[in-house]
Amino acid sequence: MENAQKVISELMANPINVGLLGLIVFLVYKIVRGRRPPVGLAPDPPLAKLKKQDFTLEQLREFDGTGAEGRVLLAVNGRVFDVTRGKNFYGPNGPYSVFAGRDASRGLAMFSVSEDVIREEYDDLQDLDSEQMERVREWEQQLSEKYDHVGKLLRPGEQATDYEVEEETTAAPDSTKSD
């Protein structure tokens, strides 16, 4: 008991310690409080899984989180991900909202969330150096572990893949096998 009182008096004797202790208590509160939805607000019901398809830049722009269902997609290194579950980050007013409905590769490669780095036309990323391309691949890997890969970003003139035919071919049972 005496040791605890000694530690408390030592902490309270220095104003820097008091400030740091207050900051720690505040951060712990925010972490714990952040895990629960705010009182009176129910979380949005999860959307149905998006059917796999390919997107042009124009089609991708429709999924910036402002549409009727609020779905958010973004592309990284030619792959399109459904990041709707991370809408607080990627959706409207989120810190990464500039990437919503767009190709985020260049911004992620350059550690920038500025509109200036986002290209409105297809970006082949040819001018990025090897370190920047490695960052793009790392982001692609992280997104693929956390979010659904829903298709690819089409280059100008590229034809979309017919995923229904692809799924039928891979899902069809092999009738030559015996049990």
Image (cartoon, rainbow, N blue to C red):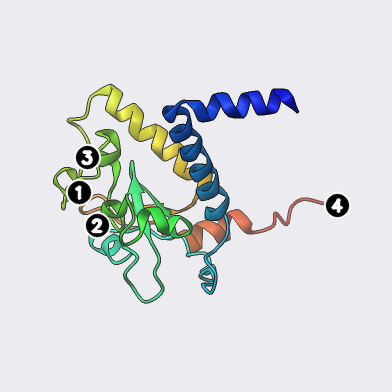
Contact between labelled residues 2 and 3, with CB atoms less than 8 Å apart? no
Q: Which amino acid does label 4 sit on?
A: Asp
Q: Name the residue under label 1.
A: 122
Residue at the (20%, 43%) spot, across then down: 123
Q: Which mark is residue 57?
A: 2
Residue at the (45%, 55%) spot, across then down: 86
Q: Residue 49 carries which label?
A: none
Q: Which amino acid does label 3 sit on?
A: Asp
Q: Looking at the picture, how far across and down is residue 154, in whole percent?
A: 29, 52
Residue at the (53%, 68%) spot, across then down: 43
Mark 1 / mark 4, whichever is N-terminal: 1
Q: Mark 4 points at which residue?
A: 179
Contact between labelled residues 1 and 2, with CB atoms less than 8 Å apart? yes
Q: Looking at the picture, how far across and down is residue 147, in whole percent?
A: 49, 50
* Crowdedness near tag 4: few (<14), some (14–19) or many (≥20) residues, C-alpha within 10 Å: few
Q: What residue type is labelled 2?
A: Leu
Mark 3 / mark 2, whichever is N-terminal: 2
Image height of 124 relative to 3, above or below: below
Q: Name the residue under label 3.
A: 124
